[in-house]
Amino acid sequence: MSLPTEIQQEIHMLALFDPASTLAGIKVHHDAEPAAIAAIERLHAKGLVTLPDGGYLTTLGQEAVRHLDGLVTILTSDIEVHS
């Protein structure tokens, strides 16, 4: 599976949110990297964040970040799994 660049950028933006807090948001300023601005706008259009420049995670966004946090935990663990 190959992830398109736009999806990778959206994942990167989601990773900036704290999965343990629903009260911590982010703001992407107008002078940020164009890729970051576009990614957060796409996340807003998909209903994952509350504002076009970031804001807070929606319920769907919180679920996405929990899944992302779980994936990062799996990928960074020292546990070897043999099939």
Image (tube, helix red, strand yellow):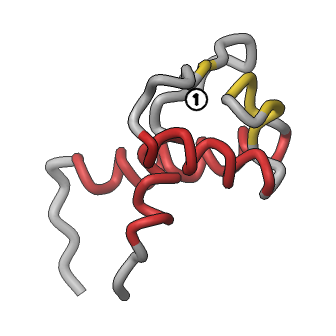
What count of labels does the image hold? 1
Which residue is found at the position 67% from the left and 29% from the top? 54
The kind of residue tagged 1 is Pro
What is the x, y in percent for residue 71? 42, 55
Location of residue 50 with respect to 67 vertically, above or below: above
Q: Considering depth in this image, is 1 or 74 the residue closer to the camera?
A: 1
Which residue is found at the position 61% from the left and 42% from the top? 40
| Left or right: 42 in relation to 81 | right
Q: For the N terminus, give its image quadrant.
A: bottom left
Location of residue 15 with respect to 3 vertically, above or below: above
| Left or right: 42 in relation to 5 | right
What is the x, y in percent for residue 70? 48, 48
| Left or right: 82 in relation to 59 | left
Q: Which residue occupies the extreme front position in the image? A: 31
Q: Considering depth in this image, is 28 or 56 the residue closer to the camera?
A: 28
Q: For the C terminus, give its image quadrant.
A: bottom left
Which residue is found at the position 84% from the left and 40% from the top? 59
| Left or right: 60 in relation to 77 | right
Which residue is found at the position 43% from the left and 53% from the top? 9
Q: Please, what secondary structure does the residue beneath circle 1 have?
A: loop
Return the residue at label 1: 19
Classed neighbour count for the residue bearing mark 1: other residues with Cα under 10 Å, few (<14), some (14–19), many (≥20): many
Q: Considering depth in this image, is 80 or 76 the residue closer to the camera?
A: 76
Location of residue 21 with respect to 11 vertically, above or below: above
What is the x, y in percent for residue 65? 60, 43
What is the x, y in percent for residue 26? 60, 19
